[in-house]
């Protein structure tokens, strides 16, 4: 049984699986119209008003599974036809209002937006309301609620607004491609573009081709996913898809932590570079602070660069929890090293498109990183790794004061303090997703329990120090 957090994830996966299945046998273009057939009128339950609308929406999901709109540089897109079920209007008074005479809501409103009818029931004047929420905070009956849409609520960088057709609209100048809206939308109306066809094309061309090998660079958060199988079986399944070698992105994390330790000691203050959503946020919202971003590439790009240096013809596909990685590989600094990015959701679709039951696979080995590289997957792990890097470089005397930021709101608070020179710290560990990479939008499952899985995975590493892990690449 496949374990997804929501039915929305399952619908998305189902389309990806069918697109991949047809792509493997080369019949995608001729069978593409059959893909919406996974929604069968009269047989398949639908969350929509009718099965025909569901089929139309599946058609849009197919387009995104095939790479989405080419004229939109953002990897996050809105399916307009699917985005019409959520209420709008911000703060509103519900039937729970008892018409009390205290009128705390009126006293809390500084815009005179609250009035009362003949029964003392509160009313909100939308022409005056600024959505501050003070009235809701003071209501003794919790009778005032915020009808802000889940996508807007989840987007902490305020990149989502409503279009004239009441569909969600993404401001690409603010969006950092973290995918929080993708995961939180209850209707699956916001999705990340898939490059699963690029990955399949690379793998198919490598079959029987001695000119290049395909490497899978796998994020350390894989340890908290695919819980119906063992990690070694997941590795075996990846190779069964057609990958020649599976390499831990955690090895790149070891390399980054070791270099960032030296860079921090030299510069005195630094912000991390491993999370592409965070670095994008810094450049868009705090451009003056961008000079503090570590010069190091992300762990994904770092280990991929090493692989291509030793084997120039290699093709590299990154597999992880992050939608922002799809945006990162479009940047000039990462593009030469990574050929495609897929998420864990998409990896599950690849397994099933080839009828690979990983729970029945023999276990393979994944071991080329240290404990410190592996714990990059959760918030605080990078700070621990940099502290170890300072120690192993003989820089333990440096006064290391990390500021681990769990989620983009914490990142914003730290960056504001840094810009005002009031930050009580000298290293900002920026993680856009709550919990770190284990909270990425492309995960199969999300949750605090994943942190324990990552730490356990780290402790299982044969290499106990960063130096031992990177000996093979230095």
Image: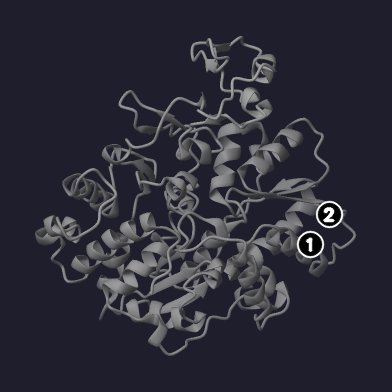
- Depicted 162 relative to depicted 22: above or below: above
Tell me the crowding category of disc 1: few under 14, some 14 to 19, or many 20 or more residues within 10 angstroms, Cα based: many
* Residue that carries the numbered disc 1 in the rendered image: 387
Residue at the image position 37 percent from the left and 63 percent from the top: 346
Query: For residue 368, what is the image quadrant?
Result: bottom right
The front one of 166 and 208 is 166
Query: Which x, y percent locates residue 468?
Result: 70, 78
Instruction: Tell me what residue is drawn at x 32 percent, y 80 percent.
Output: 356
Q: Is residue 168 above or below residue 295?
A: above
What element does badge 2 sit on?
loop
Give how far across and how far down residue 315 sits, in percent: 38, 68
Give the label on residue 412, or none: none
Question: In the orientation shown, which residue stands out farthest toward the left?
Answer: 30
In-front residue for pair 222/310: 222
Residue at the limit of the structure toward the front, as seen here: 119
How much space separates mark 1 and mark 2, taking CA atoms?
7 Å
Q: Is residue 65 left or right of residue 91?
A: left
Q: Residue drawn 52% across and 32% down?
A: 158
Check the picture and name the quadrant holding the N terminus.
bottom left
Q: Are marks 1 and 2 in contact (CB under 8 Å)?
A: yes
Identify the residue shown where x is 70% and y is 57%: 260
Total numbered circles: 2
**149 shown above or below 448:** above
Q: Which residue is tagged 2?
A: 400
Instruction: Bin the neighbour count of mark 2 within 10 Å (Cα to Cα): few under 14, some 14-19, many 20 and up.
Output: many
């Amino acid at each position: 049984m496949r374990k997804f957090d929501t039915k929305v994830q399952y619908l998305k996966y189902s389309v990806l699986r069918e697109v991949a299945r047809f792509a493997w046998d080369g019949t995608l273009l001729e069978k593409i119209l059959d893909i919406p057939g996974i929604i069968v009128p009269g047989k398949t339950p639908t969350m929509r008003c009718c099965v025909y609308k569901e089929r139309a929406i599946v058609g849009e999901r197919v387009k995104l599974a095939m790479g989405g709109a080419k004229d939109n540089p953002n990897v996050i897109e809105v399916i307009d036809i699917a985005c019409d079920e959520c209420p709008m209007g911000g703060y509103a008074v519900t039937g729970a209002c008892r018409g009390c005479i205290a009128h705390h809501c009126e006293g809390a409103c500084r815009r005179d937006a609250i009035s009362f009818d003949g029964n003392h029931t509160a009313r909100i004047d939308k022409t005056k309301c600024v959505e501050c929420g003070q009235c809701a905070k003071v209501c003794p009956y919790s009778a005032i609620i915020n009808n802000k849409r889940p996508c807007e609520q989840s987007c902490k960088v305020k990149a989502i607004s409503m279009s004239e057709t009441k569909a969600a609209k993404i401001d690409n100048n603010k969006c950092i491609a973290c995918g929080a809206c993708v995961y939180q939308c209850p209707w699956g109306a916001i999705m990340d573009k898939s490059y699963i066809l690029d990955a399949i094309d690379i793998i198919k061309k490598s079959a029987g081709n001695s000119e290049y090998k395909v490497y899978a660079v796998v994020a350390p958060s894989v340890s908290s996913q695919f819980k119906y199988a063992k990690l070694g079986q997941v590795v075996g399944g990846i190779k069964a898809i057609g990958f020649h070698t599976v390499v831990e992105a955690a090895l790149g994390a070891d390399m980054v932590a070791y270099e960032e330790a030296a860079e921090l000691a030299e510069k005195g203050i630094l912000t991390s570079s491993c999370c592409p959503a965070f670095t994008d946020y810094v450049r868009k919202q705090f451009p003056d602070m961008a000079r503090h971003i570590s010069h190091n590439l992300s762990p994904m790009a770092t280990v991929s660069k090493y692989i291509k240096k030793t084997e120039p013809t290699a093709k590299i596909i990154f597999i992880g929890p992050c939608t922002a990685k799809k945006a990162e590989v479009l940047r000039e600094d990462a593009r030469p090293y990574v050929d495609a990015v897929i998420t864990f959701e998409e990896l599950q679709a690849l397994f099933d498109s080839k009828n690979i039951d990983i729970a029945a696979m023999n276990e393979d080995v994944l071991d080329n990183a240290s404990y410190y590289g592996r714990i990059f997957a959760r918030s605080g792990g990078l700070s621990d790794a940099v502290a170890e890097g300072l120690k192993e470089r003989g820089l333990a005397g440096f006064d290391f004061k990390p500021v681990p930021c769990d989620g983009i709101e914490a990142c914003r608070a730290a960056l504001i303090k840094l810009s005002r020179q009031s930050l009580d710290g000298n290293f900002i560990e920026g993680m856009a997703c709550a919990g770190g990479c284990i909270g990425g939008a492309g995960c199969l499952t999300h949750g605090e329990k994943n942190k324990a899985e990552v730490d356990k995975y780290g402790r299982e590493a044969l290499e106990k120090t960063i130096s031992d892990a990177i000996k093979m690449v230095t």
